[in-house]
Image: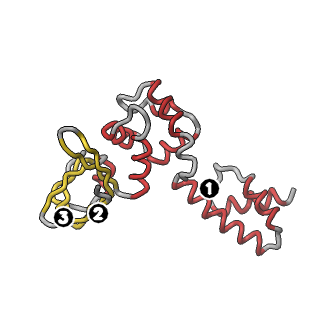
């Protein structure tokens, strides 16, 4: 089974690309978002792959990052979601929004995807909610990195670790900038 392909990008369409590696052209189905992220034709390119074995052949699906591949594999592990439907979901919803919708049980957001009705969306949320708990959105990761900086700053100001953890835990998620989050933490600690 292929995990990744690296080679010269020789064809680039909206829903598939062809990467030539060692004289062999591999056709990979991709989302239009992934296609836009790839370099121009003739350039060297690398994609992570999902291999789908069918009765009439083998299909490859390409992803710009390993994280995208992992989430795609989780998505198609749900009952009634095949690789083509998985790509449609990736096409319609940003990965971070998809993760957030599933974590929050918002099946209504998934019904915006063509071919995903209420029942399928609810089943998707039900089957994947526990599986994706450990996945953080890029925004969540950025907030976590910001909070590490805030923790260091508060430690330098003489606050104890338990106070710092409590302050960070109570920061509103809508406050994104480091300075604003630090201000909010200091305000919490001054109570």
Q: Mark 3 or mark 2: which comes first in sequence?
A: 3
Q: Kindly report which numbered mark, 3 or 2, lies closer to the viewer in this rendering.
A: 3
Q: Secondary structure at mark 1?
A: loop
14 left or right of 152? Answer: left
Q: Residue furthest left?
A: 23
Q: Kindly report which numbered mark, 2 or 1, lies closer to the viewer in this rendering.
A: 2
Pointer 3 with pointer 2, Cβ within 8 A: no
State the CA–CA distance, disc 3 to disc 2: 10 Å
Quarter residue 6 falls in: bottom left
Q: Secondary structure at mark 2?
A: strand
What residue is drawn where x is 81% and y is 62%? 162
Decide which of 170, 121 is in the foreground and name it: 121
What residue is drawn where x is 55% and y is 53%? 136
Quarter residue 10 falls in: bottom left
Find residue 92 and name its label: none
Q: Kindly report which numbered mark, 1 or 3, lies closer to the viewer in this rendering.
A: 3
Q: Residue furthest bottom?
A: 156
Decide which of 119, 9 is in the foreground and name it: 119
Quarter residue 75 falls in: top left
Q: Mark 2 or mark 1: which comes first in sequence?
A: 2
According to the picture, the residue beneath numbered tag 2 turns out to be: 46
State the CA–CA distance, disc 2 to disc 1: 33 Å
Find residue 176 and name its label: 1
45 left or right of 135? Answer: left
Q: Position of residue 27 (x, y in %)?
A: 19, 51
According to the picture, the residue beneath numbered tag 3 turns out to be: 21
């Amino acid at each position: 089974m292929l995990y990744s392909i690296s080679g010269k990008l020789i064809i680039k369409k909206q829903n598939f690309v062809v990467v030539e590696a060692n004289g062999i052209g591999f056709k990979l189905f991709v989302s239009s978002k992934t296609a836009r992220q790839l370099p121009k034709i003739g350039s060297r390119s690398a994609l992570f792959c999902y291999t789908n074995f069918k009765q009439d052949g083998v299909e490859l699906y390409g992803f710009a990052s390993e994280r995208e591949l992992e989430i795609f594999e989780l998505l198609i592990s749900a009952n009634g979601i095949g690789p083509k439907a998985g790509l449609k979901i990736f096409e319609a919803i940003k990965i971070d929004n998809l993760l957030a919708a599933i974590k929050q049980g918002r099946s209504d957001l998934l019904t915006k995807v063509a071919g995903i009705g209420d029942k399928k969306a609810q089943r998707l949320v039900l089957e994947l909610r526990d599986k994706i708990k450990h996945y953080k959105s890029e925004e969540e990761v950025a907030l976590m990195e910001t909070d590490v900086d805030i923790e260091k700053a508060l430690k330098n100001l003489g606050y104890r670790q338990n106070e710092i953890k409590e302050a960070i835990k109570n920061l509103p998620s809508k406050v994104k900038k480091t300075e604003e989050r630090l201000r909010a933490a200091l305000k919490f600690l001054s109570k």
